[in-house]
Amino acid sequence: MIPLVRAEKGKAMVVAGVMSGTSADGVDVAVCRIVPALREGGVPRVKVLGHLGFGYPKAVRAAVLRVMEGEPVAPAEMSRLHWRLGEVYGEAVAKACDAFGIGIKVVAPSHDTPPYAMRPQRAGHPGSVAATGMRLGLVGCHGQTVYHQGVASRYLGAPVRCTWQMGEASVIAERLRVPVVSDFRPADLAAGGQGAPLVPMLDFVMFRSERVNRVLQNLGGIGNLTAIPAGAGVDELMAFDTGPGNMVIDACMERLFGKKFDRGGAVGRRGRILKSVVDGVLRGGYFSALPPKSCGREEFGSAFVDRFILLCRGAGASDADVVATATALTADSVVDAYRRFVWGHLGAAAPLAKTEFVVAGGGVKNAALMGMLREGLGALGVRVREMGELGVEAQAKEAVAFALLGWLRWNGLAGNVVSATGAGRAVVLGKVTLG
């Protein structure tokens, strides 16, 4: 269990978690009420008060993608983007708190800034606009990952692993006048871990069960899972990135259809799946590598999509066939990861327990993808559920995770799961910027 170190027993805090994923399509804000554990060795209680998603302004998204894809970008432009994202995150938190009746003190920029072109996508807590009497106490902001290298390689004569999340925390703290915890991944990297995945701590705190095995799968840009045997302690978790989530599907849709994503999986449903292409990709080194492991655009970004489309065209694929095959790649990579790594882990730990496979992230809205997962996992006797059935909106989960990780940092508690990241020890994650 997570030790209770210095969180004031019983005192609740309202924390906003802010997440921008590898899809680079926008910002999710989850406003949470977190209460310390009731007893020594227990876990905090997390209640989601509401969730809002905001699309990036078009120009901001284009700038983010240029950096993420490794295009030549001047240092001045990267610095400006870093600060601009700080404003975007601060505005997103302000709008979410206003929607859910959470008190904040918003301080306008001292310079002339045009109104933010951010569009609320949906609310996770309708009808909560009345004042609650609660005030925002902390922000946990993941930032926008533009580069992540979890495995060391030699640079300037020494082995280096590194990560970079953009979004200036000082801007958020100044605009909202509350402390901000940011830059969560470096402490785990410095301790010998891969800096990812970090969501397993939330999975353990909120979704561990005494009766059933649970596998928590997120389908954002990248797919990642946490496997929790029934009744497990935090050191018995298995977690890793399964490979592409929506990233390859979205990229194929943008290139071939001029659309940001495959709405409802309509294109994926009508296309033909090229099984030989999927099987060939799954023979790649990443999928067979043992956990812990993590990946991102470095493995499955623009260059990968170029090769993937060429493979599909070589097999006689239409545009719809390419998207269907990309969808099958995501589904099969998840099923393959479960069969190859997770099945034995759960069986060894809890052979008599039933297993639930709980899916979160934007991929939940892709009916073609979800159908493929249900078919593949159902053949293994695994029940597929959606995160909303467990009380957390599918697209809110990762933002909730960074609310919890921010709260843990504020209270001096470790946030990494060493069996997930491969770190040498449990460490406190994140850097604090006072408001």
Image (cartoon, grey):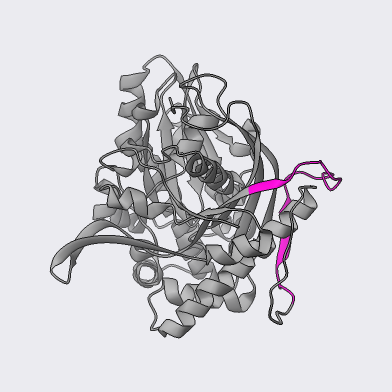
Up/down of 206 relative to 362, above or below = above
> Does the magenta-highlighted stretch encompass residue 120?
yes
- Camera-nearest residue between 247 and 271: 247
Q: Which residue is depicted at the point 80% across and 47% down? A: 101
Magenta portion: prevailing SS class: loop
> Does the magenta-highlighted stretch encompass residue 222?
no
Q: Is residue 18 left or right of residue 242?
A: right
Total residue callouts? 0
Quarter occupied by the C terminus: bottom right
Residue 330 image position (x, y, % from top left): 44, 52
Quarter of the view holding residue 18: bottom right
Residue 366 image position (x, y, % from top left): 59, 51
Toward the top, the furthest residue is 352
Residue 2 image position (x, y, % from top left): 44, 28
Toward the left, the furthest residue is 157
Q: In the rendered image, is residue 7 in sight?
A: yes
Extent of the magenta region: 115-137
Q: Which residue is depicted at the point 36% across and 25% down? A: 346
Q: Is residue 72 left or right of residue 23?
A: left
Q: In the rendered image, is residue 255 in sight?
A: no
Q: Is residue 124 left or right of residue 186?
A: right
Quarter of the view holding residue 27: bottom right
- Camera-nearest residue between 346 and 150: 150
Q: Which residue is depicted at the point 77% across and 50% down? A: 103
